[in-house]
Amino acid sequence: MKIRIKFRKYGVLKFIGHLDVMRYFQKALRRAEVDISFSGGFSPHPIMSFAAPLGVGLTSDGEYLDIEVNSTDSSKEMVKRLNAVMVEGMEIISYRKLPDKMKSAMSQVAAADYLLSFREGYEPQNWSEWVEAWERFLAQPSMVVWKKTKKSEQEVDIRPMVYQIGLNGQTIAMRVATGSAQNLKPEFLMEAFYQFAGMEWSSFTFQVHRVETYMEGEDGFVSLEEAGTVIEMD
Amino acid sequence: MRKLALSDEILLTIEKPARYIGNEVNAVMKDKNAVDVSFVMCFPDVYEIGMSHLGIQILYDMFNRREDVYCDRVYSPWTDLDKIMREKDIPLFAVESQEPVKSFDFLGITIQYEMCYTNILQILDLSKIPLLSKDRTEEDPFVIGGGPCTYNPEPIADFFDLFYIGEGETQYYALIDLYKEHKKSGGCRKEFLEKAAELPGIYVPSFYETEYNEDGTIRRFYKTNPHAKDTIVKELVMDMTDTYYPEKPVVPYIKATQDRVVLEIQRGCIRGCRFCQAGMIYRPVRERKLEMLKERARTMLKNTGHEEISLSSLSSSDYSELKELVTFLIDEFKDQKINISLPSLRIDAFSLDVMSKVQDIRKSSLTFAPEAGSQRLRDVINKGLTEEVILNGAGMAFEGGWNRVKLYFMLGLPTETEEDIKGIAELSDKIARRYYEIPKDQRNGKVQIVASSSFFVPKPFTPFQWAKMCTKEEFLDRARIVNHACREQLNHKSIKYNWHEADVTVLEGVLARGDRRIAPVILKAYEKGCLYDAWSETFHNDLWMEAFEECSVDIAFYNNRERDVDEILPWDFIDTGVTKEFLKREWKNAKEEKVTPNCRQRCSGCGVMRFEGGICIENKN
Ligand code: SF4
């Protein structure tokens, strides 16, 4: 049986990288006595896969992990059991059953929402100038930047990968392409903007927070959670 | 939300920020200001190593069981953070509370190997605690050392306010109570040390002095404070079952060296190998009861979520209920896909059967530790492993499908001759020959034999404590003889020989065997930038040699002369329970190539029977 787990990662847990988050969950699933299925072979490992790895330094309210189990309790009970073995900085939000033929979370991911806020000491000195440049930047029909891939460096237009973007006070909210087909990191977009505006860029400028991860739905994006159904038991 | 001592910028710049943020699974995290006594436990090496240490997990759990105590943890910042902390003047902090180390009542440092001595100074320095005990004030925590290296605490005596000699489970509560009282009554630092000096196992180095003879040897070691004891008897736990052992060990986020549940099945060793310090200082053997181990295996696996469990002891094969324990572990946890790791098992029919159940034979290797190449020398060191036993064990394993063998040896053992040295290559070859006795169609490809040698350091409290140690050149010459001899063997293509660095061994020798005159050298080496000496990439032998030179300390005096059995040794004031007479007798037996039976065969009267426990008592019953 396939299960999709949604979780939050916050606080100091943002310093734990993706590989360690995987290790963390392997152990957490054991602590919660989840009846997880294992791969075959001499060194069996639990069957689990993550949707979209979150970089070190980022927090998130919408992380996903798919697992396979042999048996399960109700969604409500499992969320409770898992939360009982979490550390501060990890919280299980939902535990849902997926249709058997469902593609993995990883291959479903299509977009994600982010909130970016200025880290202390990196706020713009002149906010109205900043906003003015921002508007000019976004008004461009295309945003061609050099993007490094594993093999080469190539010019790409990142504008089509930005689905929605806006300001809420000094917080930037955006929905961008995420996943294996197309992927735009929010920091990458912001760096392009700082370059466009001739402002000094530091990778520490923003605290980046992922709000939700989406897949393609019938009409528009739906959260990965929607693919699953709540397990009820009495 | 917890506030961290380091900024996001720093944490996102350095390697593995998870080393410094605490908040691990099962971390206790109390309010430091709401307890009577705060203790920060330090392992002076990088986090992944420190988190793997069982002793700290035991004490951490034991301390935190008390509501009036908070025990936090600290590890050596890696060199990247070390540099930043010095530049930005950030004081060292404990990982859970993120509060300055200096703000705790106690800083407890476990000292597991000599090569961490400069890391101890780093911890003090970054914490802004004066490096020398004599310079500390009421503002500073009490710095207390424990662990195997404290059986000769003299080279680092100047850096510590107290040492705890022996196993931590027994006297720490009393020490904490004493401190609580002291805090209430408001006495000064010295008054507390005087009270502490009266507790069993506690050594306050500032209450003692050493006088030296003209030839550099010790004339007199004596106490200068009436509260101090003449000898410090090591502390030990007699009931290993009804004692402290964690049920919820802390689980780090990043992969620690020991990424598994560690089940300590017993302490001590019955074997009495003459080179082995652990085998002497942890006497007598004390086993934990099977029922307790079963119960702990269950709870610890459940509470950590680890996917592996490992038995820990000096010689697991000697545990009297090993079969029952291992069978239980396999039956109980196999379905949960828990790996079972069984280090230090003697190769025999039972262990091969178990190993074939718990490991992939094609990927695992057999391990033997003959320690010496010839039977003669194995008799000298009292290593009761014969060639016959090795060849039989290897033969059985080869027939069962194994084809990799690891062999561990030491070079530079007392009385070692060229023949003994060449024996390493010859034994390796004999094992290879045994493999090729199996018909070609029944064997599993080629055999791979990896022989490794380390260089021998005569450690305090062993029968070899008086022995002369080799110089670097002598060590390397011996390694070259082995290497050459390996190439001359019939099966030389199947044998790989590795040897350790000799520089480190020489230094280990001085640090392990030295007296109080070594402290200035350690200090100087640290000032010159020595740190993480246990790591080959950060070890700077040249700086150490400069430090010896500048302090006019002669390495040869400590390492390269045989000490007279009547010479006062720097560690003589410590009483491990094993008598000096026994060690002398064993030193003589070694020279006469006489084997001493192990404790289970026959008691040889080492002296620890006076603790009235463990094997010494079982034997009598
Ligand atoms: S007193 Fe005898 S039995 Fe006890 S540890 Fe010593 S030699 Fe072994």
Image (cartoon, coloured by chain):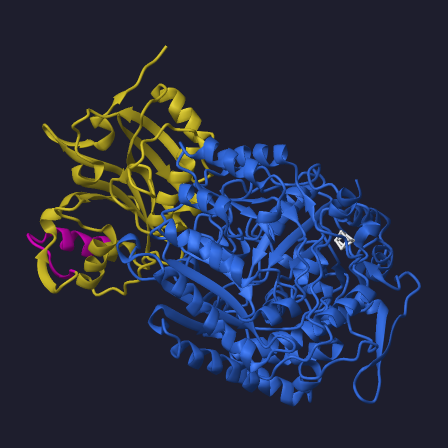
Q: In which quarter of the image is residue B511?
A: bottom right
The one of B520 and B364 positioned closer to us in this rendering = B364
- Residue B327 placed where, x, y %? 50, 35
Identify the residue at the far top of this view.
A234
- Quadrant, the C terminus of chain B: top right
Instruction: Examine the structure image and report whether residue A144 is included in the region drawn in magenta.
Output: yes
Q: Can residue A85 be seen in this view?
A: no
Tell me residue B139's x, y (percent).
Answer: 73, 61
Of all chains in the rendering, the one displayed in blue is B
> Position of B42 compared to B590: left or right?
left
x and y percentages locating residue A84 in the rendered image = 47, 29
Farthest residue to the left: give it. Answer: A141
Q: How many marks?
A: 0
Residue at image position (78%, 60%) is B578
Give the residue drawn at x 10%, y 27%.
Answer: A218
Chain A, chosen colour in render = yellow
**In this rendering, is residue B550 above or below A39?**
below
Q: In which quarter of the image is residue B226?
A: bottom right
Residue at 69% of width from left, 49% of height from top?
A: B38
Q: Does the magenta stretch include residue A139?
A: yes
Q: In this view, does B408 lie above or below A18?
A: below
- Is B116 in front, or is B113? B113
Pinpoint residue B269: horizontal percent, then vertical percent: 66, 53
- Locate residue A46 relative to residue A135 in the image: left or right: right
Placement of B13 over or under B131, stated as above or below:
above
Q: What stretch is highlighted in magenta?
A: A131-149
- Left or right: where B136 falls relative to B185: left
Q: Is residue B425 something one can see in this rendering?
A: yes
- Viewer-proximal residue among B446 and A37: B446
- Find the residue positioned furthest to the right: B226
Tell me what residue is drawn at x 48 percent, y 46 percent.
B349
